[in-house]
């Protein structure tokens, strides 16, 4: 049997249909280009009959994608098949994906048809689609709840009609690994022409088993896996493709198959899709979550620093991530503190590890997470954490007009002096405050991430703002918490400014020390 598993991505069809807001043509194209760059074999780009907008986006994507096969969905309805064929006509080779339900439940209560009528509709639609392309995929919707006899019967007819890919969807996320394996094995044993087609599975995650079911199907002989990046999709979502792809790579010893995927593109593609679809990735999500390669416990951190394989089954660089991430918290040991100091270029003679570690634990208890610049500040400027911060926000006022300009004024205590500034911008009140603060400090910072989350419920909820900025090629974080979200935004920036100020003080101090050492 072929050892290549075809990866079929339906982020733009099954994934998109689950989003709160539809994506624009431009956004869909951006996602398609990113999937193409990742080496996805087949990209299902839409359901052209569903709306003129979808038709247009399928047309645009078809003109721009060359390396992946483009595919569009159609019901067993002639106008759907025509729309799919016409929308993709500018592409050299494309696939039409037709679907029809085959379970008794769907046939009786949704379609009001008997099984013979279903077979006729399916075969008729395949003939219509073959006028546009010879690459036809057929999905027996709700296949996991279809009797195995019926499934074998329709699959044989479909392959005889010219279907190249038979898809077995677990439409409602109901099946479990043993059962899907039983279904696929039965198809291979009982359908005489089965070897003329590729067997595919399309799993939903209602019981959290989509990836497990897909892997089980591969072991039973399936050679196409359908899913979405980050697992987005109807209800609990679809099979998370990045998880299947990495399972195939990491457990090649057992699975004995491979994909055409460019693994280094996985992380980037996942980030792009999360941002465009406005679907944040949970921190503990396998492969692409922000904690997937972050080590927190002291024992694990020490183990990883000695040999990454102790606690890492995937080298993060395989998916395009650069660094090992050790979360600096009160659970971290000396090894993690030393690792970050080494990363910043300090040798153990520059500081006293015992004193630094004691100060670090106190700060970690107070602050939760500690960053590299905090360690630097602890090591070189303030071992006691009770010193007042250099910058403190004394006053702010903002005025914002709908579709117009926002004006902000701030009073910032800088050491012992109060400075006042104001700014006007068309980018909203937060930007106005940030610009006013910047007019005082003049730090050349680039805002990289701004995240607002509600803490608590109702009118008493607090708005927490987390920001990440780049300053002289280093990253600095800031947090602000207040009932007024403009105030929490301002506080988060003041927090960042204090962190940068400390890093600058460390720099100055180290320069002076070097100067005296030379003498
Ligand atoms: O879940 C499903 O059954 C589908 C089909 C259209 C393949 O998305
Ligand atoms: Zn689906």
Image: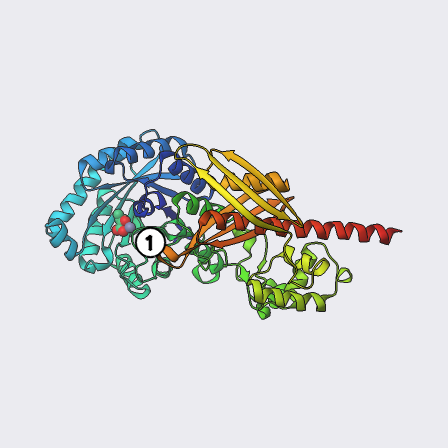
Q: Residue at x 53, y 50 (%)?
A: 491
User: Which quadrant, please, contains the N terminus?
Assistant: bottom left
Res 260 visible:
no
Q: How many marks?
A: 1
Q: Farthest residue in the right direction? A: 519
Where is residue 361? Give x, y as percent.
62, 68
Nearest the viewer among 203 and 358 is 358
Identify the element where label 1 is drawn: loop
Q: How is the image coloured?
A: rainbow
Where is residue 426? Give x, y as percent.
47, 33
Left or right of residue 438, residue 13 in this image? left
| Residue 375 vertical placement versus 28 (above, below) | below
Q: Residue at x 50, y 34 (%)?
A: 425
Q: Farthest residue in the bottom direction? A: 299
Tell me the crowding category of disc 1: few under 14, some 14 to 19, or many 20 or more residues within 10 angstroms, Cα based: many
Within the image, what quadrant is residue 315 found in? bottom right
Nearest the viewer among 375 and 480 is 480
Where is residue 439? Give x, y as percent.
60, 38
Q: Residue at x 52, y 41 (%)?
A: 433
User: On the image, numbered disc 1 is attached to which residue?
Assistant: 237
| Residue 428 vertical placement versus 226 (above, below) | above
Nearest the viewer among 312 and 408 is 408
Within the image, what quadrant is residue 353 found in? bottom right
Within the image, what quadrant is residue 384 found in? bottom right
Q: Residue at x 69, y 63 (%)?
A: 383
């Amino acid at each position: 049997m072929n050892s290549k598993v075809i990866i079929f991505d339906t982020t733009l069809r099954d994934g998109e249909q689950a989003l709160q807001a539809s994506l624009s043509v431009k956004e869909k194209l951006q996602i398609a280009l990113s999937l193409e760059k990742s080496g996805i074999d087949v990209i299902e780009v839409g359901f052209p009959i569903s709306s003129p907008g979808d038709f247009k986006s399928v047309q645009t994507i078809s003109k721009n994608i060359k390396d992946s096969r483009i595919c569009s969905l159609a019901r067993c309805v002639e106008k759907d098949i025509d729309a799919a064929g016409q929308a993709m006509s500018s592409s050299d080779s494309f696939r039409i994906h037709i679907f029809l339900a085959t379970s008794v439940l769907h046939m009786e209560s949704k379609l009001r048809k008997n099984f013979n009528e279903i077979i006729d509709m399916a075969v008729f639609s395949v003939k219509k689609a073959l006028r546009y392309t010879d690459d036809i995929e057929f999905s027996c919707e709700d296949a996991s709840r279809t009797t195995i006899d019926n499934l074998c019967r329709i699959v044989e007819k479909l392959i005889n009609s010219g279907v190249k890919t038979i898809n077995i969807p677990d439409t409602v996320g109901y099946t479990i690994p043993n059962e899907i394996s039983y279904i696929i094995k039965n198809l291979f044993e009982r359908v005489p022409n089965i070897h003329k087609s590729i067997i595919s599975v399309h799993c939903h995650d209602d019981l959290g088993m989509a990836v497990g079911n897909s892997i089980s199907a591969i072991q039973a002989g399936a050679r196409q896996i359908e899913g979405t990046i980050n697992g987005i999709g109807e209800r609990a979502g679809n099979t998370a493709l990045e998880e299947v792809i990495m399972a195939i790579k990491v457990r090649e010893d057992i699975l004995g198959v491979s994909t055409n995927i460019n693994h280094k593109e996985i992380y980037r593609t996942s980030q792009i899709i999360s941002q465009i679809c406005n679907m944040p990735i949970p921190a503990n999500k396998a492969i692409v979550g922000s904690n997937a390669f972050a080590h927190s416990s002291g024992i694990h951190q020490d183990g990883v620093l000695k040999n990454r394989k102790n606690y890492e089954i995937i080298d993060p660089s395989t998916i395009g991530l650069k660094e090992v991430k050790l979360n600096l918290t009160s659970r971290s040991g000396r090894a993690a503190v030393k690792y970050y100091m080494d990363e910043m270029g300090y040798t153990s003679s520059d500081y006293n590890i015992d004193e630094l570690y004691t100060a670090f634990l106190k700060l970690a208890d107070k602050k939760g997470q500690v960053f590299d610049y905090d360690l630097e500040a602890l090591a070189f400027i303030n071992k006691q954490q009770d010193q007042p911060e250099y910058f403190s926000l004394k006053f702010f006022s903002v005025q914002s007009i709908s579709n117009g300009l926002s004006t902000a004024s701030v009073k910032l205590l800088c050491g012992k002096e109060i400075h006042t500034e104001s700014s006007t911008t068309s980018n909203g009140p937060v930007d106005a405050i940030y610009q006013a603060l910047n007019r005082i400090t003049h730090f050349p910072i680039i805002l990289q991430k701004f995240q607002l989350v509600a803490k608590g419920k109702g009118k008493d909820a607090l708005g927490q703002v987390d920001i990440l900025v780049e300053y002289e090629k280093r990253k600095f974080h800031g947090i602000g918490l207040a009932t007024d979200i403009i105030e929490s935004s301002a506080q988060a920036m003041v927090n960042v400014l204090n962190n940068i100020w400390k890093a600058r003080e460390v720099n100055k101090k180290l320069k002076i020390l070097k100067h005296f050492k030379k003498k």
